Amino acid sequence: MAKQTISIDPITRIEGHLKIEVDVDNGKVIDARSIGTLFRGFETILKGRDPRDAQMITQRICGVCPISHGIAATLNLDSAFNVTPPSNGRIVRNLILSGNYLQSHILHFYHLAALDFVTGPDVAPFVPRYKGDYLLPKKVNDAAVEHYIQALAMRMKAHELTALWSGKVPMAQSITPGGVSQKVSVDRIASTLWRIRELKEFIKNVYIPDVLAIADVYKDYGNVGIGYKNFLSFGVFAEDDAQTEFLFKPGRYTADLDLDVNSQKITEDVEFSWYKKEIGRKHPSEGQTDPDMHKENAYSWVKAPRYDGIPHEVGPLARMWINGDYRKGASLLDRHAARALETLKVAEAMEKWVLQLKPGEPVFTPFEIPANAQGMGLTEAPRGALGHWIKIENKKIANYQAVVPSTWNLSPKDEDFQRGPVEEALIGCPVPDADNPINVARIVRSFDPCLACAVHLTKPNGEIKKFRVC
Amino acid sequence: MKLTRRQFLKIFGASAVGAGITSLYNPGLIEALAADDGKPPVIWIQGSGCNGCSVSLLNTVHPKISEVLLQIISLRYHPTVMAGTGKTAFDVIYEVAEEFKGKYIVVLEGGIPTAEEGGYCTVGEHNGHHVKLTDLIDFLAPNAAALVAVGTCATFGGIPKGKPNPTGVKGFAEYTGKTVVNVSGCPAHPDWIVGTLVHVLLFGMPELDKHNRPKLFYGKNLHDNCPNYSYFANGKFAEKLSDDGCLINIGCKGPMAYADCPLRHWNSGVNWCIGSGTGCIACTEPNFPDAASPMYAKLPEDMIPNRIV
């Protein structure tokens, strides 16, 4: 096959608008570009508003993981307001976030990714589909289709237990700086606990076995989709009220070494992004984004976050790797396996947390809004490291920046010509049929992209310059 | 629920008379909805939004989402759900538009960014060209049997239209100038989405309010139906989050909101916003989020109903 460029637009079964371009030579990917195709301007919309509104508005960045933005925003405001939630507040936040982890991971595997391996019934929306190597034996495939349906009910149950504490979901109402507004009662504890137990059985007996069954049949893909093997996590699910111990600790794994994380070493690079070059590498808290659609060689709305100048993959595999829970490999199949095993680890922790709640004790610590302050909120969304930064002036938002998981994973090249983690993972990907680049889609989806989050922009004077998308 | 074409026409035809469907849909609708083996072909497109309404739809209890997908509608295009990818997926839109001209339903989730000639949102490639959301809507809307806006972004512009509306977002009706059935909410409740679709399919057009929303779901004021109303009437007010009492002093925008949340509740009925101790942010209303901002600040006195003492 001659050298050619294949454009896949839209990448479906993800959150948001994404296009992937790959250069293919001799049936293998030799270069790749990931391109976000929607821009909304959240940081511009946030400017000038009451800081407390940040967790309501940033949740609307993403309908799949609104909770993660709500938590990042409240941690950000906790730090700006200098307030610490009481035990119940911390634990309820953990339950809200973890409930959405279960929902998101089950949804991702069964309803977003599985159709790359499993063939559904021959009716819409299960057809049309890429032609490709659907290798599962009929019995396994049929069971997986049944589990697709069962998983719809399971992810809904995970949302129910989340809503018991958040009011509703998507878009949680009860998360607030200082804790939560949902009071703790025994009926809610019981209603949550038994839902967790049912979900845990599903994860153990259905989800994990299905992932293993697919991994077994597709074992030739055990070396496909490996990227840099650099991992980063901000840590998530505080186990103590001082928020120093976490279910998943912060850390990184860079060039085969286990290392600590210092948020000051995060920079955003715009060499190949449609933003003015003089901004260069900056810490996100100083982030100002000045678009320039005519910039030569630029190809993406997504900036290129780097840690110490180095690209890092974020997500379940990164968290499980850093915590020593999973180190078998870093292929596309390993991403699915790490995600499934993480789901069980989170469900088991939830069972413990819900019994640590104390009915009748406070869930919320009152706070004052300072006239001027800065804040930072670091957490982990289901799909990886998430950071929010705020600057408050005269009790209003003066600057708000978010660096989201898919910015790390789907970033373009940087000034050192280093590809983003997804781009790197695509190198060498087999593409036997240019009209049906199913393996490219498999690799991209293994990262669980969330593009609505990844494209964001603010400009000091609030004016957006003329530019085009794609 | 899966109907033969004949059954469908019979039920729909009869209810159409009963419900007095006339002007809102083009006359081909009844025929249209029987088009694809009794399941109307639906093209669900996503614009400037977050997929939250699609995720919310997955939480429908009865009918279950699998029943909605396999028995009620023929969901021919939906970027988050469908098996196809890239060209394999996107070409479906053009096939359905041709095969079912005048007979397909377009559901829009997300607003329509119109600034920079619509360049802020492209949704796919067709014949080697990038397709902007505005191009796709211009192509699909004229020959659709019905247009449905799901969520506040699609109905009124919503969050991306928040001040200063950096990408020039418009709602579906505002952009097309056509009659659109609006199912607002950030997100829309699954019962509102499914209920509206089923209402249209089995009983004809629901009665709509002045914002073209089904009165069945949006007909009542939220504050008037709030279980905290007795606190309000008796003057017991929460002064900080997690206090007992009416939440009006800590920002509840219930008096602005028209939605049946206090009666229906969310997520299989386990809870709802005010039930979790934080005020309503009137996410179903035009001018959300600006009209509800600051979200934790008390409404101006003239917007708070008098207490009957």
Image (cartoon, rainbow, N blue to C red):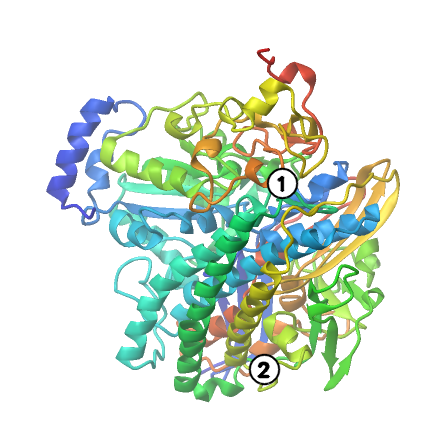
Residue A429 in the image: state x and y as whole percent.
51, 81
Count how many numbered circles sit on residues in the image.
2
Q: Quickly name the residue at label 1.
A: B167
Q: What secondary structure is marked by label 1?
A: loop
Residue drawn at x 79%, y 66% is: A266
Residue type at mark 1? Answer: Thr
Quadrant in which residue A418 is drawn: bottom right
Depth check, front residue: A158 or A113: A158
Whether residue B89 sits left or right of residue B15 in the image: it is right
Residue B224 in the image: state x and y as whole percent.
51, 21
Q: Residues within 10 Å of mark 2 (few under 14, many from 20)?
A: many
Q: What secondary structure is marked by label 2?
A: loop
Residue type at mark 2? Answer: Ala
Chain assignment, label 1: B
Q: Is residue A148 above or below residue B264?
A: below
Residue B122 in the image: state x and y as whole percent.
53, 51
Q: Which disc number belongs to residue B129?
A: none
Q: Is residue A189 above or below residue B278?
A: below
Q: Is residue B214 above or below residue A110?
A: above
Q: Quickly name the residue at label 2.
A: A330
Single out the residue that lies furthest toward the top. Answer: B309
Residue drawn at x 53%, y 38% is: B153
Depth check, front residue: B252 or A424: B252
Single out the residue that lies furthest toward the right. Answer: A372
Residue drawn at x 55%, y 82% is: A331
